[in-house]
């Protein structure tokens, strides 16, 4: 546990001006760190809470709920990164490195972000953006030139945030339980997305 803590990153302040609202309310720092297998139940429950708002949008909710309620399984393909405030997990995301097998609508050399989730009670404090920035940092560390994700227009907060971060829509992805998705790409290192 000590080694994990030493690699944890404490986030303070962001340029969006709203990022630390939740942390000020909590009066403790946001810690970004690697997921531990012992946190599988908490991460899965967090994903379910985060997607609950879309219950009436996705078709076959019980089947979709089973998929999102197994977020911890993404650690088999990549790294799950968690956000913690005062000992409570308030956000999570999966980072899948370049060259690791992924869905056909992503190029193999693209690192990707999957299932970025934030506890509904902790939203508005920049946690989601901080998790996305950590994935981008890891993609740059891994030498990637581009970074990808897929999302939907129903993600009314996430999609505009991704666009402000420099992601551009590059293709359509297959629908997920009746919801249309697209692939978005961000070029790293100042180059233009192609």
Image (cartoon, rainbow, N blue to C red):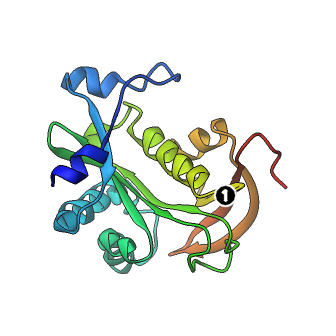
Q: Is residue 104 above or below residue 138?
A: below
Q: Label 1: how many residues lie within 10 Å, few (<14), some (14-19) or many (20+)?
A: some
- Residue at position x 66%, y 80% in the image: 104
Residue 169 visible here: yes
Residue 62 to residue 150: above or below: below
- Position of the N terminus, as image quadrant, is bottom left
Residue 70, given in percent of the width and then of the height, sits at 31, 74
The structure residue drawn at horizontal position 35% and vertical position 37%, both measured from the top left corner, is 123
Residue 191: x and y in percent read 81, 44
> 98 or 59, which is in the foreground?
98
x then y, percent, for residue 105: 68, 75
In this view, the residue in front, 122 or 155, is 122
- Where disc 1 sits, the SS reads loop
User: Which residue is located at x 50 percent, y 46 percent?
Assistant: 132
The x and y percentages for residue 76 are 38, 77
Q: Quadrant of residue 34?
A: bottom left
Evaluate whether residue 119 shows in this view.
no
Residue holding disc 1:
144
The quarter holding residue 149 reads bottom right
Q: In which quadrant will I find the C terminus?
A: bottom right
């Amino acid at each position: 546990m000590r080694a994990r803590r030493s690699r944890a990153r404490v986030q303070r302040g962001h340029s969006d001006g709203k990022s630390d609202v939740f942390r000020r309310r909590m009066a403790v720092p946001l810690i970004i760190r690697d997921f531990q297998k012992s946190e599988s139940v908490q991460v899965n429950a967090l994903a379910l809470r985060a997607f609950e708002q879309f219950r009436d949008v996705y078709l076959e909710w019980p089947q979709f709920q089973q998929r999102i309620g197994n977020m911890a399984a993404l650690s088999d393909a990549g790294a799950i990164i968690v956000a913690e405030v005062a000992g409570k997990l308030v956000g999570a995301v999966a980072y899948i490195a370049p060259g690791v097998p992924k869905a056909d609508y992503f190029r193999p050399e693209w690192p990707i972000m999957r299932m970025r989730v934030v506890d509904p009670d902790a939203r508005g404090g920049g946690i989601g953006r901080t998790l996305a920035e950590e994935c981008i940092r890891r993609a740059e560390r891994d030498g990637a030139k581009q970074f990808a994700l897929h999302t939907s227009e129903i993600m009314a907060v996430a999609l505009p945030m991704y666009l402000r971060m420099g992601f551009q829509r590059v293709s359509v992805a297959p629908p997920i339980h009746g919801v249309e998705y697209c692939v978005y790409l961000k070029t790293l290192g100042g180059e233009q997305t192609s």
